[in-house]
Amino acid sequence: EIALDFLPNMTLGVFHDGAMVCDVVSGQMHWHLTMPDEVTALLMRAFEHDSITKVFCRVSDQLGYDYLISGSHLADKIRDTWLAQVPDRVTIHHEAGEDQVRQTLGMRIVTDQQDLLDDVEKTIAGLASADQIFWHRLWFGSAGLYVLQIYHRDVNKWPALQRIAKQHAIGDDQIAFIGDQINDVTALRKAACGIAMANAIAQAKKAANHITHDCGISGVAHAIDQLLAGRWG
């Protein structure tokens, strides 16, 4: 809400690592890219494991997504920590079927065992459909959760960001982008000014034009100061 006060005419946002663009005021979805339904179903069947929980981010009539949690081991913990800010959009269905996960924007495989997530990645890499998807892992330290995020292979933040820029007649040569993860690399490389956080992964830093402070000491604010002062650009 604070950002919208300063940018009242720019209400479009990029969500789910670039899989969706929607208006945060009206809830209207402007664009999205879902995973192939048959690949989502294949992944469901491949990971029926007591220590693995699956979270599906689905296209809905709300702000563009609902979260469906399938599995029982970590369902309550995921709902009460990671997804605690959106409880009205979270559904727990311990044994969800293929019909419930059609039109999935992204799928998360969640466990509290790091070695198990290593095995999951190896399994996905060996699937015949692996070339249709993109995945990367996250660690939610405060909740003790290891998460593998999976999307359509063409999902990244740059095309989604370009769609918003085009609506405001902003060219690629006017775009600055700040990021820290593997799903930010394309935008960091293609933006006129790519800025990586100090705590970013190595690939993000390599793709960036500048490195700001880390997220714990106002790295984003520092980057904006540099841009407004004309020192970076």
Image (cartoon, rainbow, N blue to C red):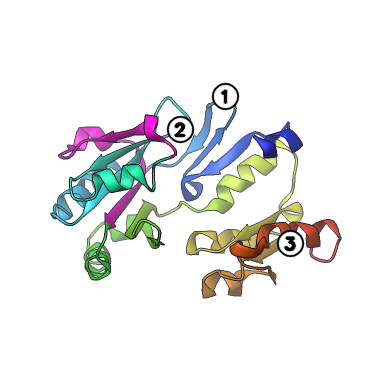
The residue that appears at 61% across and 67% down in the rendered structure is 214
> What kind of residue is marked 2?
Gly
Separation of disc 1 and disc 3 at Cα?
31 Å
Residue density around tag 3, few if under 14, some if 14–19, many if 20 or more, within 10 Å? few
Query: Badge 3 is on which residue?
Result: 222
Separation of disc 2 and disc 3 at Cα?
31 Å
Separation of disc 1 and disc 2 at Cα?
11 Å
> Would residue 182 be found to the left or right of residue 205 on screen?
left
Find out whether residue 161 is within the magenta segment.
no
**Sequence order check: which comes first, mark 1 or mark 2?**
1
Query: Badge 2 is on which residue?
Result: 64
Give the vertical position of 22 relative to 142 (above or below).
Answer: above
> Would residue 15 be found to the left or right of residue 102 on screen?
right
> To which quarter of the image does residue 61 belong?
top left
Q: Which residues are magenta?
A: 85-110
Give how far across and how far down residue 10 sits, in percent. Answer: 69, 35
> To which quarter of the image does residue 11 belong?
top right
Viewport quadrant of the N terminus: top right
Query: Badge 1 is on which residue?
Result: 26
Give the vertical position of 51 relative to 90 (above or below).
Answer: below
Mark in front: 1 vs 3: 3
The residue that appears at 45% across and 32% down in the rendered structure is 64
> What kind of residue is marked 1?
Ser
Q: What kind of element bears circle 3? A: helix
On residue 59, the disc is none
> What kind of residue is marked 3?
His
Give how far across and how far down residue 124 sits, in percent. Answer: 25, 62
> Would residue 225 be found to the left or right of residue 58 on screen?
right
Mark in front: 2 vs 3: 3
> Would residue 38 be found to the left or right of residue 174 on screen?
left
